[in-house]
Amino acid sequence: MADPIIRLVNLHKSFGSLVVLDGVSFDIPTGETTAIIGPSGTGKSVLIKHIVGLLEPDEGQVWVGDVDMATANEKRKYEVRRRFGMLFQDGALFDSMTAGENVAFPLRYHTKLNEKQRREKAEEMMELVELPGVYDRPTSALSGGQRKRVGLARAIVLEPEIILFDEPNSGLDPLTSDTIDELIGKMKRQLGITFIVITHDIVSCVNIADHIVMLNGGKLIEHSPTQSFIRSENPFVRSFLRRNVDLDALKPL
C-alpha cells in the first residue's frame, strides 16, 4: 500500500448524547481510491468534515500530510483545504452560468489567469471528462450525467491532490454510472489524484475503489483492499453486501 496522505487516529465525535464517531482509526493511501460505506447515519459525512477541518474532534487526530486538522489554526486549515477538490451529489452547479463557466469559476478566485486562459484551462478539463465543445451550453440543458461530469471537471480544474466525492452516482442510470466510474479511474491514472468516495452503491464501490472502509454505529467495522473486503468473513460486512448486491456477480472492472 502507498504511503498515507491522510491518517485518522482514534477519532471521537459526539453531538450531545449522540455518539457519531467512536475511536475510528485508518489511513488513506496516496494516489489511490478509498471508498467509505455503511448504513445511513453512521458518521460518513461527519468523518469527511473532520478531514477538511470543518469539524473538530472531541478526541483524536486528523493528519493531512504533516498537518493535524484537529489542532491547526484557521489559516493553516485554509492552506490544507486548497489541496482538496470536492464533488457533491447534485454537482452544486450554478444554473445561471454555462457549463464551462462553472468549470472556470474556481480559477477566477484562486489564480491570476485572465479570461482567455481560464476558458482554455476549463476546456482542457472538460475534454478530460469527455465533454468537448459544450463550454457555452446552458447548465440547465445538461443531463444528470453531464452535470456530474461538469462537477468533476470543476473539482479537478485547480489540480488538487485529493478529491472528495459524495455519492457520485446518485440519481444516475446504470450505464451513466458505469461511465462516471470509468472517468474516476481515468482521473486517478492520468492525474495521480487521491480519491475519497462516500457511496451506497456497492457495485460502483467495487469498480472504482482500491480500498473500502465500512463504518457502523460510529465504529470502524472493516478496512481492507477491495478484493479482501468482498471476501470478508465479518458477519456485518457479509450481511450488508448480501442485502445490496449479488455477491457471486460482484467483480471489479
Image: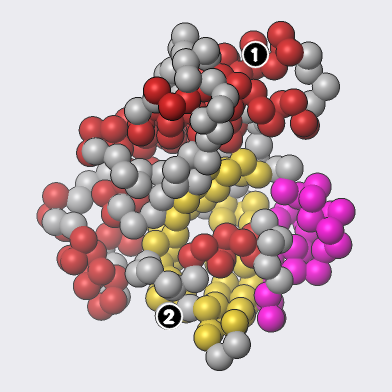
**Element at label 2:** loop
Q: Earlier in the sequence, mark 1 or mark 2?
A: 1
Which amino acid is tagged 1? Answer: Arg
Q: Which residue is mark 2?
A: 217
For residue 244, what is the image quadrant? bottom left
**Residue drawn at the location 66% of the way across and 28% of the way down:** 105
Span shown in magenta: 57-81
Q: Which residue is mark 1?
A: 119
**Residue drawn at the location 35% of the way across and 28% of the way down:** 143
Q: Nearer the viewer, residue 138 or 133?
A: 138
Instruction: Please provide percent x and percent y for residue 145.
Output: 36, 31
Which amino acid is tagged 2? Answer: Gly
The answer to whether residue 2 shows anywhere in this view is no
Instruction: Please provide percent x and percent y for residue 216.
Output: 40, 76
Crowding near the residue tagged with mark 1, few <14, some 14–19, many ≥20 C-alpha atoms within 10 Å: some
Q: Is residue 30 magenta?
A: no
